[in-house]
Amino acid sequence: MRAVLLSALALVAGASAHIGRPRHGCTESHLLAKRQGGTVASESQLTNPTQECTAYSVPGIDANFLKLFPQPWTVTPAEILAGDNEALQYMQGINASGVIPTSIGVRGAQNEQAWAGAGLAGTYDIPGDPDCWWTDKGCTTPKHPNLIADVETCPEPETWGYSVDDGPNCTQNALYDFWKQQNQKVSLMFIGSNVVNWPLQAQRAITDGHHVCAHTWSHKYMTSLTTDQAFAELWYTIKAIKYVMGITPTCWRPPYGDVDDRIRGIAQGLGLRTIMWSHDTNDYNIQPYGAQPTASIQANYQSIEAVGSSPAAATGGIIVLQHELEDAVMSLAIAEYPNIKKNFKSIVPVNTCLNITKPYYEDYTFPDFEDYVGGKIDPSPSGQSSIAIGSTSYTITPLTYAASSSAAGSVGTAAAAGGSSSAATSAFSAPTAPGATPVNTAGAAAATVISSQQAGSSSKSSGAAVTLVPGLFVFVAALVGAALC
């Protein structure tokens, strides 16, 4: 059905609220701070939207910090910044690895007036779909070699995989407070521009114990970008999340789901697993910013909630796409939560439904599914009162595919990590071998076995696996205090 809609893609995109505007993103004028920011705790106490969305200054963010990133929320996509030799070196390494299929070109172009992709289909072989272009037919299993399949479902039965796009949002406090009251953790897909615009809101995701993935720098149709632009959209998002939040994401979600094997290769080279969804609430399109009345979006929720009592729920869970945008979207998420809870046995973040306990390179340990549903929901460490924005270094390790001889669709067991299925088999686990061989060096040894996590697979069985091939590129920045929104 997606193929039928391609000719109208730009029109639909222009009508979609989260496509047509950054929604609480900052323009250049916002870079002049209007108030002194406090801490994550003090910022989370604000309840007035005007105050919440007033630009603020925080230690660690100044003009030198801004020079490390593209300007937030520009209409044009991110580019590799002049003089960013680290980015250039890593892009060269990914190209040399051969993980990016060279036969796939740019699709159409960004419509800079509508923040939308225009003419993406072009002369593409839609019936054949040779490049596993999700926008065409919802393809999630790559057709080019050495690429890892997307995650789109939870293997745990009767489970709602809770994922929320487009944060952090300056008016998120009511929603995050609700999650805290409900002892609910969520997988949050963060936009890089929003992270640097709203650093304390971004940090709350960590202090509250949520799971964080990347959602690009400026929410563009990724297949319409050049390889360097697509790299930059991910690169600077990873960097912003690390510098502001102290963690390095190993998962991402493409805006609008627009991904093909070329974009998967770029993401994989940056150590990112592609996380899709099986069900879409379409909540972004709610009035007054979108085109659909509240009743229509409620009906979408109800149809997804009904899945929880269907026979299919007994064989596996779902991953649901929701958003943290303006108040109408977040208020509806709060209103529908009791109905979700009534229809699904478990509501968990995506990493939990996949039994991923080490989703970052840093030393964070999350509960597996069994622990989470048993009430042990907090990662360790947890409850930090503040996160310093300052000098930091980090490593990104590319993912490479390696199929085992076992049956596809189930989770592999990693002997290197002690044989613990829940802790060691992961769709985006962090590597453990320091000083490893760079990605562009032939013959790099595999370090950690992680699961291909096919839809509907059991989280406790053995099977096809992918491996992390270590590559060491360390990025260091000295950051001093000043202002940014």
Image (cartoon, rainbow, N blue to C red):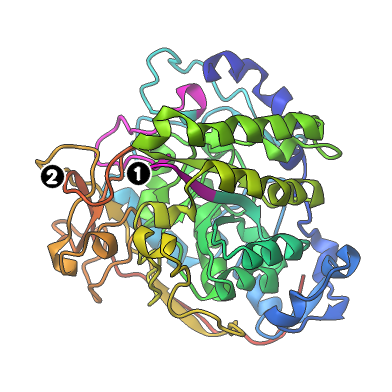
The residue that disc 2 covers is 404
Labelled disc at residue 155: 1
Dot in front, 2 or 1: 1
Which of pointers 2 and 1 lies earlier in the amino acid sequence? 1
Q: Main secondary structure of the magenta part?
A: loop
- Tell me which amino acid carries mark 2: Ser
Q: At 61% across and 85% down in the image, what residue appears?
A: 385
For mark 1, give the secondary structure: loop
Q: Quadrant of the C terminus?
A: bottom right
Q: Is residue 109 above or below residue 383?
A: above
Quarter-wise, where is residue 363 in the image? Answer: bottom left
Q: Is residue 16 above or below residue 155?
A: above
Quarter-wise, where is residue 383 in the image? Answer: bottom right
Q: Nearer the viewer, residue 336 or 66?
A: 336
Circle 2 crowding by C-alpha within 10 Å: few under 14, some 14–19, many from 20: few
Q: Is residue 447 above or below residue 272?
A: below
- Whether the magenta-drawn stretch holds residue 159 is answered as yes
Q: At 49% across and 22% down in the image, what residue appears?
A: 136
